Amino acid sequence: MKISVGLYGNNAHHIALALIQGFNKHYKLFRATSKNAKTRFEQADWLGVHKAVRERIRFYDDRVDECVERLHDEFDSQSLDDATWQQVKLLYIGLLLNHKQPELAESFFNSVTTKILHRDYFRNDFIFVRPTLSTENIEAEFEPTYRSYYAVTGGLRGAIRKIVDDFKWQRPFADLERDVNYVYRAVRQHLKGMPAREVNFQIQVLGSAFYRNKAAYIIGKAINGSAEYAFAIPVLHDENGQLYLDTILLDAWRIGLLFSLSRAYFMVDMEVPSGFVQFLRSILPNKPRSELYIMLGLGKQGKTMFFRDFIYHLHHSEDKFIMAPGIRGLVMLVFTLPSYPYVFKIIKDVFGASKNMDRATVKRKFMMVKQVDRVGRMADTLEFSNAAFPLNRFDPEVMEELQTLAPSCFEIDGETLIIKHIYIERRMEPLNIHLDRMERTNNIEGVEHAIKEYGSAIRELAQANIFPGDMLWKNFGVTRYGRVVFYDYDEIEYMTDCNFRKIPLAPDFETEMSGEVWYPVAKNDVFPEEFSTFLLASPVLRKIFHKHHRDLLSAKFWQDAQLKIREGHVEDFFPYPQEIRFINCPPEADPAS
């Protein structure tokens, strides 16, 4: 029954209750699938892992749509006055006073109400433009956010053993004592000897493991005097199905790479997510909170925090949005703000003549990237609707491009430019520009590293069931750590949807020299032999590519990769170097020494 304003005086209270009930249902489902990650890990259900990641991404939007529908069904929302909507927010705040996820609930409130209200209401009077409740020191009801360990019984080795045991994985370790010794030795080597223990020495470990792909990660830090030492320990399955500690990451920047947006989101069981983020920030102070929330699977909260940070940055800067450096794309219009390390992408109204697709297809490809394991080789994007930008911050060239190539994608409201749909991602140096710079400075080592990384990116994407489609240099970027990442998604396909073929022999010499295709080509046919023609015109680059990745130019590599995927094989991808894995420790080293 729809409740009208005149008939029922406490609409605001009922709307606030509907909103909090909608959020609580969402987080209950979100937490249940995250909690089940432990079982999937124990059962080595790797296909189930990928399925759960894909499904979890839809949870938030499904619950928001449910709540919007409920409010439309039960209330005549269009007839509610401003005072009522302000009261809804105030009552909702009251419902969050003892909540364990208040910041997430505020974002859910915004997601629902902005689908109902006109953007004139997108002010702090009606929605949570700024956060209202502090997330500091929220205590979990059942399990603490982190556990503390002391090297009393059994020394440091005993503490490490206890840390691992407390995760209670229902699968035996192959040789935990051996692995504990490896960890001990790695710590000692990293610190160049063990420092004397201060009276406050303790090890703090987050209470839930971080699950992704085929690994579980133990995340923590050791405190000794005024020093703090972050660490992450990946736990894997061996060929016999037993567990082992693969390595220990002790450099903060290496741990930070685990949380790169070019990788799949973690599954983590969190009663108080702000507590996990606060702990992670203590060991990764340079990692934005928005990215940590995103990597914990809380994408909407990450987007909320990102845009708050972005607006703050706009208030404290004066530079203008300019067109992003590099070759202009046929599908996306890309601009950037030089003082902010991101690019902004808009789908054009009209694509280049060679692009046979529509806007819906492009959006579907971007969603596909969120749902797969990006294996550190595809940039994640933040997707926004009706994003407001200050009009006076746009360079005339950007405005001209918008008006010419994407006039339906924006509107101007006074001094504000409203972009109806936009993607935002980390800025990288385009690979073609990077290679030009390496060649101009005669940095042959830099060129070889970039080409080797480029081939590795294509190879690893293939193993993860992704065919990039358009593999031109300009569609790849180089991160600050020298890693090559793919970021042009309009032509990506699942490997299993492609047909990789060898070019048939020409019937005669004249046919081969004619330049005309003498064989039938279906829509999803791919001929890897042609890659060299389109990508490797430079003799120097061709020589380097052949040295490291010649097999990518044959149909056999791609067909073999397809076969493994279809057989249910899930590849191992390591977000750290092979040489630091314990199985690659020098044979002469004694792990117990």
Image (spheres, rainbow, N blue to C red):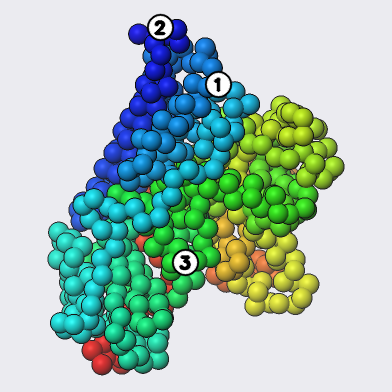
Q: Position of residue 16 (x, y in %)?
A: 39, 27
Q: Could you tell me if residue 227 is visible in this image?
A: yes
Q: Residue at x 40, y 91 (%)?
A: 192
Ranked by sequence position, the earlier of labels 1 and 3 is 1
Q: Is residue 71 above or below residue 548?
A: above
Return the x and y of residue 502 as percentages of the image width and height.
Answer: 53, 49
Mark 3 and mark 1 in contact (Cβ < 8 Å)?
Answer: no
Answer with mark 1 or mark 2, whichever residue precedes in sequence: 2
Q: Amino acid at mark 3?
A: Leu
Amino acid type, callout 2 = Leu
Distance of mark 1 from mark 2, alpha carbons?
A: 18 Å
Q: Which element is circle 2 on?
A: loop
Q: CA distance from mark 1 to mark 3?
A: 42 Å
Residue 437, position as x, y percentages in the image: 75, 69
Q: Residues within 10 Å of mark 3 (few under 14, many from 20)?
A: some
| Quarter of the C terminus within the rendering | bottom left
Label 2 environment density (alpha carbons within 10 Å; few <14, some 14–19, many ≥20)? few
Residue 144 spot, x, y in % from top left: 26, 58
According to the picture, the residue beneath numbered tag 3 turns out to be 284
Circle 1: is it few (<14), some (14-19), or many (20+) Cα within 10 Å?
A: few
Q: Secondary structure at mark 3?
A: loop
Residue 8 image-quadrant placement: top left
Badge 2 is on which residue?
A: 7
Residue 30 image label: none
Drawn side of residue 172 relative to residue 71, left or right = left
Q: Which numbered disc, 1 or 3, marks the residue closer to the eye?
A: 1
